[in-house]
Amino acid sequence: MGILEGKKALITGIANERSIAYGIAKSFFNHGATLAFSCANQKLCKRVEELSTELGGGPIFECDVSKDEDIKSLKESLEKELGSLDILVHSIAFAPKDEFKAGVLETSREGFSSAMDISVYSLIALTRELLPLMKGKNGSILTLTYYGAQKVVPHYNIMGIAKAALESTVRYLAYDLGKMGIRINAISAGPIKTLAAYSITGFHLLMEHTTKVNPFRRAITINEVGEASAFLCSDMASAITGETLFVDNGYHIMGVFEREEDYHA
């Protein structure tokens, strides 16, 4: 029996089979969860449709999280299809590509607003709207962040600021939701070659650096993030809320790095 047996989960943000959200969905399914999916537009929903067959063929809903009416419609559709919800996975982030090219000084007002709205406020909006479906379920909510929320990562720019706000939001929501028996946590995953990652200028250099200096000297996988997510959303983690769990091969513990010629010693 899987650790998520009998639980119903909504997975947001799958773009393709390399998405972190896909790794989470796959682990959830392998651990017994019933899945539903949401995506921002018809094009992305078509991709999810192709992937969902191996994940139980759950319902797929189109939802633009920048629109309150879409979120309300998502809640109504979920209620009709699943009746209730145990787990919400928020794997949604966005900033215009141009915002990654220069520094934070060059951030546009429009870019700042859209990054904070879609990457941060969407967690609050989805949580508030879907709460009635989680009533009495001792539910769990999970979002995804990155080390750039806590330390400067050149070119991550406004997304680092948004992720810092997201991590703070997790803590404040943990306080509000605890009264209802619902937990919320974040996973800070190391860099992975996803579709979104390639929007970041110099991502290949970031990937190379973190792979060289983390204690395991290798990249993480979406499956590793998926397994950690399954644990956090299971009853095994019933006393964990408001936390950011690093799944980055220990990169975040490093201070002074070795000489480059020693990396592969």
Image: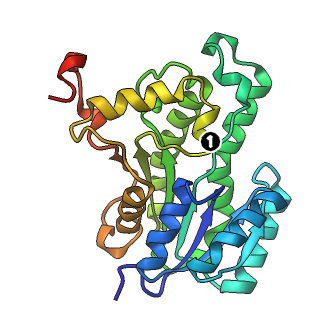
Q: Is residue 167 above or below residue 52?
A: above
The residue at 37%/64% (across/down) is 227
Residue at the spot of label 1: 196
Using the rendered view, name the quadrant where residue 225 is placed: bottom left
* Residue 181 appears in the picture as rendered: no
Q: Residue furthest top?
A: 105
Q: Is residue 100 above or below residue 236?
A: above
Q: Position of residue 4 (x, y in %)?
A: 41, 79
The residue at 41%/60% (across/down) is 223
181 left or right of 70 in image? left
Q: Amino acid at mark 1?
A: Ala
145 left or right of 59 in image? left
94 left or right of 32 in image? right
Residue in front for this viewpoint, 239 or 8: 8
Q: Position of residue 105 (x, y in %)?
A: 64, 10
Residue in front for this viewpoint, 239 or 219: 219
Q: Identify the secondary structure beneath mark 1.
A: helix
Q: Position of residue 250 (x, y in %)?
A: 26, 40
The residue at 77%/21% (across/down) is 109
The residue at 66%/45% (across/down) is 121
